[in-house]
Image (tube, grey):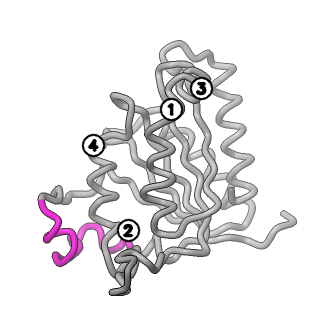
Amino acid sequence: MTDAPKRLLLIQGHPDPAGGHFCHALAQSYADAALAAGHQVRRVEVAQLDFPLLRSQTEWEHGETPQALQQAQQDIAWCQHLMLLFPLWLGDMPALLKGFLEQVARPDFAFQKDGGPNPFGQKKLRGRSARVLVTMGMPALVYRYIFRAHSVKSLERNVLGFVGFGPIHETLIGGMGSISAADRLKHLEKLAELGRKGD
């Protein structure tokens, strides 16, 4: 490996705690290759975490992060590069993953209120890159060019970019309902290559 080893965090956003989905196979391919290349890898399995949903702005701003998510926050702060995987459900990320992001991306952890004209002035997670990987039933080109990848762009701009992640790249894998074994292997190999690069 020519590049220096990185601290990688892999967040598995598939909400099925039983696992066994293509998202899980992709994550495993990435992690195995990254470890073999000398990177450090930590993993967060959102489906295995037990946490409540936020129900008010006051709770988000002044409540404590649930104990079940405090390690996830530590892992986010630790990482140099984030790989976030999830399936597209009803045009967006699954609700469980959205609830997770709302809980961990709190003031004083993800950004600092500076009291000035910009209440969200200081992005506290600068210096970290990210990749968003999304699987979906529709062809990826349809989602990207007809639907303009709206939910992924919102995640990149309004969540990850908002707290300082950058650059942010994306990988879209479509046609999951009829994907061939050859295409599955191709995508797994691509994830292994990303893992080796720490991207």
Residue 61 lies in the magenta stretch: yes
Badge 4 vs badge 1, beta-carbon distance below 8 Å: no
What residue lies at 52% left-to-right and 69% top-to-bottom?
164
- The residue carrying mark 1 is 135
- The residue carrying mark 4 is 95
- The residue carrying mark 3 is 145
Badge 3 vs badge 4, beta-carbon distance below 8 Å: no
Residue 83 percent location from the top left of the image: 55, 54
What residue lies at 53% left-to-right and 12% top-to-bottom?
178
Badge 2 marks a residue whose secondary structure is helix
**Label 1 vs label 2: CA separation?**
23 Å
**Label 1 vs label 3: CA separation?**
16 Å
Numbered mark located on residue 78 in the image:
none
Q: Is residue 38 left or right of residue 170?
A: right
Residue 91 percent location from the top left of the image: 38, 30
Q: Amino acid at mark 4?
A: Ala
